[in-house]
Image (cartoon, rainbow, N blue to C red):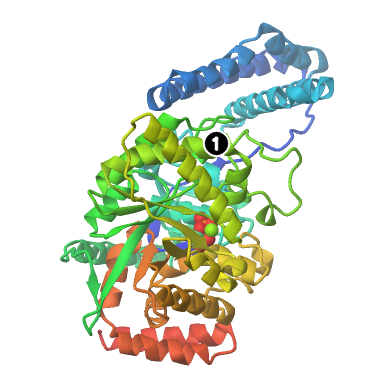
Amino acid sequence: MKVYQGVPVYPGVAIGKLSVVVSDRVGSQKRVLIQPGQVDKELRRIEAAFRGANAALETSRDDATRQLGAEFGRLYEAYLLILNDAGMRSRIEKAVSEHLVTAEYAVDSTLNQQADLLRNLDPHYAERANDILDLRDRLLHELLSIRAVDRAETTEPTIVAASFLKPSAASKLDPAKTSAIVTENGAIGSHTAIVAAALHVPTVLGVGSFLTETGETTVAIVDGELGRLVLDPTPDVLAQYERKLNRLHEEQRRLESKNRSIYAKTLDGVDIEIKGNIEFPQEAKTCYEYGAPGVGLYRTEFLYLTSPSGTLPNEEAHFEAYKQVAEAMNGRQVTIRTFDLGADKLPNGLKFTPEPEPNPFLGLRSVRLSLRNGDMFRTQIRALLRASVYGKIAVMFPLVSTIMEFRKARMIFNDVRDELLEKNVPFDRDIPLGIMVETPAAVITLEQFAHDVDFFSIGTNDLLQYAMATDRTNPSVSELYEQESPALLRMIKRTVDVARTYDKPVSLCGQMGSVPENIPLLLGLGLRTISVAPGMILRLKEVCEGYSIADCQDLAARAALMESSTEVRMLLRNDWHERTQTGY
Ligand code: PEP
Ligand code: MG
């Protein structure tokens, strides 16, 4: 048995087989020589790899055509054409038969050379060169039997293990085939962690090197509460975890059988809204069924992250997604956030800056990117306006730091509105426009915004990273990235107080709200609407029902006296422990 400790990211336990996936470029292949007698075998392997890659591309083409339209399907045709170019295949085969190298090395070296050649010929061919590298990866996956994230071949759910998962790759995992996620690298504030919550599977990130040890593993355990990975557990440990899994299932059944009223009422009768954060349209159904009074944050950038490489979703793809969410919520409010791309959320095969940015989290991301890419922004706005007749939609802009940014975004929004008005396209005329409060600049100048915006939503994930000057995805500085930070608590308090002074609705949609122990503190800071991972809605409603606002205010007042995150965390944990012991 081997036990590894990582960062707990989404609770729950999974027991089962591991399946290793790659989400990034396959590393370069070593030059291994073969005997002349092995040439035929290597050539047969190449033939099988081409056959496999061809079949996979045809499946992707058919899926894309069915889900997104023929225009997207055609993109795969381009790959198929390159793959089936006889010249390319014969160059690879020649490398094997003339230079006596393995199939892996022949594919790797031949296609790298070809990509370099294209790139040096003309920088405009850079995308074509990337296509060649994608094909190289596909062929290597076949030769090395590595599974790419979006090509689940298992029929049973397995624990997905990877060295690192980008958010775009994680969002391609099939929840029906993924029982847990565990990675060697990764941090709690990353968007990969957020996708894990959307998939609703136990997740542990950053456990350090373990993939080389998994060769013989038959059973693994992922404990999303304790942040633990166990390989080949002893019979005792396995039995212990089986009992824990049963307890968790029972608890989920109990929560699901409870009355699903829209509001959670505190002990002193105050109504609290626990809304849902979603990344994919199908999650809205869970929010509705769990009695959420709305979707507090729809991260629409995941539409871009799940699009075929190098493509943007078209207006219809946007429209269908927003309509689906609006209809699923059946008149309850859906707050759609315009695309929050950039930094760690970059769609595959697309670039927004000519060179990689030196500090992407301080770069061209979120609303800044929208203002710089007017056509892309307008396409999204047109679609969400059109979808607004199917439900109750609110719109918010991410990472706004100045009032001018908000006004520019609103101007574009109004311009698209006028265009639809002229064309007699129906839409809701009263869509509220709000901002995410996730930069210290927004917090400190909030009064300026209060005159212009209809609502505020506090994004603690980014607010914490910018307040502490700490990259949310960087585990080396994670001791500063703590949600109980006194600096963050003061910023939340100020935002809630200013919003209340100006009579503007304010909610919180950062990950902080999805942690049960934090709920009383957030209620004590004055929040009455919190938007959380859908899988946590029932549990958090129950937490709200166990507290009185007076108790929460007392807790927040005590937290305000603390000088460190550790002290605040201890305070919250002790309070939680006392409550749960006395069976609140
Ligand atoms: C946040 O920053 O708190 C937030 C909700 O947005 P995201 O995590 O998508 O950046
Ligand atoms: Mg954010």
Q: Is residue 22 above or below residue 395?
A: above
Residue 158 appears at what percent x and percent y?
Answer: 42, 46
Above-or-below relation of 99 to 548: above
Q: On the rendered structure, is 202 left or right of 460? A: left
Which one is nearer the viewer's eye here, 494 or 177?
494
Which residue is rendered at x = 74% and y = 44% of the image?
A: 356
Query: Residue 129, how many percent across, how many down?
Result: 72, 24
Numbered marks: total = 1
Q: Is residue 227 visible?
A: no
Relative to 526, is 123 on the left or the right?
right
Q: Nearer the viewer, residue 130 or 418?
A: 418
Residue in the picture at 36% in, 85% down: 552
Question: Neighbour class for label 1 at 10 Å: few (<14), some, many (≥20)?
Answer: some
Above-or-below relation of 4 to 499: above
Q: Can you give x and y, in whole percent of width and height, for residue 435 in the image?
A: 49, 59
Residue at far top of view: 86
Q: Please say whether residue 273 is visible from this viewpoint.
A: yes
Q: Residue at x 30, y 45 (%)?
A: 326
Q: Name the kind of residue labelled 1 in the image.
A: Met
Question: At numbered mark 1, what does the secondary structure look like: helix, strand or loop?
Answer: helix
Q: Residue at 29%, 72% (x, y): give it.
A: 272
Q: Position of residue 28 (x, y in %)?
A: 74, 35
Task: State the residue lying farthest toward the front.
Answer: 422
Q: Which quadrant holds the C terminus?
A: bottom left
Label 1, on which residue?
376
Q: Give the answer, above or below, for where 161 lies relative to 55.
A: below
